[in-house]
Amino acid sequence: MLRDVKILSSFFFSLLLLVSCSKNSGSGGGGGDIKQFLANSQWVGVLSQNGYQYAPPASIRFKPGDSLVIYAPFYLTTGAVSNWRDSLRGKVTAIDEMADGKTVVVKTSLEHFGDVELNFTDRKTVTANAPDPTNPNRPLNFQMEIYGEKNFSLENTLWSGPIMTGAGPTQGLPAYPDLSAIGFGKNYTYYMRNGTIVPEQPTPQIPTPGELKIACKQVGAVVFMFGYNENVHAIIPYMGVLLPDNKRMMVFSSSGTARLPNYLQTIAWYGPIGQTPIIEKK
């Protein structure tokens, strides 16, 4: 039975302050060719590692009608109130083409942050620019690349962390064990441990036939899902961002119980410390 789980993701967001000179500028959108290029496009990459155990994944998705969504770990502060968000919405307000012929600045109004400029180079990469360095929520840096596959589905795929190598107690163990292995059905995930599908009721006291299935959601390159810890029979919220080859997925969890690399570990039980976790399609 598919469990109806409300996904509560917790993340933090950052961007890079840049300065550029405009060859020509517009208002209310402008740049028809660029607008066509951006429409329904998606971009994937990582945020700055500053303040994180590793650089977390992020994605920008442009929607019809000049709107956009940025998926990333946001920790937002307004006065004395702070809260976590997994995405923010915005709108394109102007498009400027630079004199170098390679750079296009897309000006946006982003929820909570206000005016933010997205700087595209050769239509292949994007960085970002927020004008107020005194803003306590100011973005720091990120860079993304275009994600070209719009119709890729995770359904009927199986993913796992790589097998760790080298001398020591982690040799032969899979990295990122909460997601090793995780399979995708139609809007749900299931789990395999030691080559066996995890049953619906995994505790030995009350065995139940069937598979443990947890709801998930894919939004283009972005995936909201749960990992599974077989040691304590717990599910853990995760966010994933597919890389352009659709064979690798960057993953992030804000949960303190997630089995992910941590600088406090004396042995890297869950994968390389300081590196963005990436699971692979089997």
Image (cartoon, helix red, strand yellow):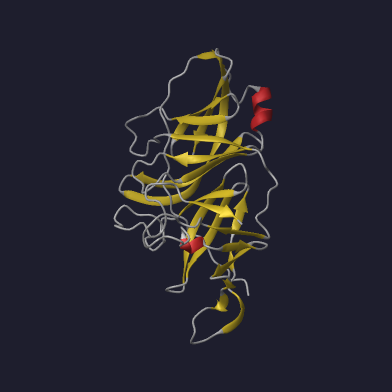
Depth check, front residue: 50 or 106 = 50
Against 134, residue 186 (above or below) is: below
Q: Residue at x 47, y 56 (%)?
A: 9
Q: Residue at x 48, y 45 (%)?
A: 57
In the displayed structure, does residue 48 sit left or right of residue 39?
left
How many numbered callouts? 0
Image coordinates for residue 252, horizontal then vertical, percent: 46, 52
In the displayed structure, does residue 63 sit left or right of residue 127?
right
Quarter of the picture containing the C terminus is: bottom right
As drawn, the residue found furthest toward the front would be 167
Q: Residue 207's quadrant in the figure?
A: bottom right
**Is residue 135 in view from this perspective?**
yes
Against 82, residue 115 (above or below) is: above
Depth check, front residue: 132 or 171 = 171
Depth check, front residue: 29 or 50 = 50
Image coordinates for residue 5, horizontal then vertical, percent: 54, 66
Q: Residue at x 32, y 44 (%)?
A: 79
Against 152, residue 61 (above or below) is: above
Image coordinates for residue 24, horizontal then vertical, percent: 57, 13
Against 103, residue 252 (above or below) is: below
Image coordinates for residue 278, horizontal then vertical, percent: 50, 50
Q: Residue 182's quadrant in the figure?
A: bottom right
Q: Residue at x 68, y 23 (%)?
A: 33
In the displayed structure, does residue 246 sit left or right of residue 47?
right
As drawn, the residue found furthest toward the bottom would be 205
Quarter of the picture containing the N terminus is: bottom right
**Is residue 116 in view from this perspective?**
no
